[in-house]
Amino acid sequence: MELREFFSEEAIKLNIEGTTKDDVLKELIGLLVLDDKNEAMLFKMLKRRENLGSTGIGRGIAIPHCRSLVVSKLRVAFGRKRAGLDFKAIDDKPVNFFFLIVAPPLEVSNQYLPVLGKIAQFSKELDVPERLLSISEPSEFMDLLKEKGA
């Protein structure tokens, strides 16, 4: 299983405009192209997850994730905010990179946790945050995943 199988260039936004945690979550959800009702439901689920503890894992990276009936298969999106944003990350530093993961409650292929783990592993590579800041096209994001074997 490779991460790039789950990403599409349409679900990559390199200039997140939101200035609050809620704004960013809504922008990421928008990348999944759901109807308004499902977007609202997914936002509620992600907020509930964030209230348990921030998904900001440090080094400028957050991985908001949840299971929800609004998707029929695992979906991912990536967003970048160069200026960074207070996401209540565990290291108290601003977050620049957001990996959204949404999976249905019951998944035959059971890819949710492995994808979450792979994103965390990819994010821990020393040069990844710097490289993510320097990309200018969604295709370069896909190339970086390929290069890292992710």
Image (spheres, rainbow, N blue to C red):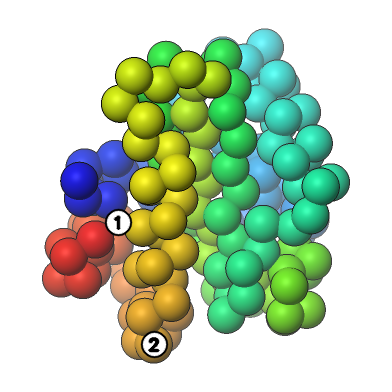
Q: Which residue is mark 2?
A: 126
Q: Tell me the element at label 1.
A: helix
Residue that appears at 62% across and 15% down: 38
Q: Quadrant of the C terminus?
A: bottom left
Tell me if mark 2 has few (under 14), some (14-19) or many (20+) residues whose alpha carbon lies within 10 angstroms of its own. few
Q: In the depicted view, which residue is nearer to us: 32 or 52?
A: 52
The kind of residue tagged 2 is Leu
Q: Position of residue 89 (x, y in %)?
A: 73, 69
Q: Is there any visible trace of residue 34 in the rendered image?
A: no
Q: Is there any visible trace of residue 62 in the rendered image?
A: yes
Q: Earlier in the sequence, mark 2 or mark 1?
A: 2
Residue that appears at 36% across and 58% down: 118
**On screen, 114 above or below 141?**
above
Residue that appears at 38% across and 47% down: 115
Q: Position of residue 70 (x, y in %)?
A: 55, 16
Gap between marks 2 and 1 measured at Cα:
21 Å
The kind of residue tagged 1 is Pro
Residue 138 badge: 1
Task: Using residue 142 as the reference point, say whether residue 111 is left or right of it.
Answer: right
Residue that appears at 39% across and 68% down: 121
**On screen, 35 above or below 125?**
above
Q: Quadrant of residue 41?
A: top right
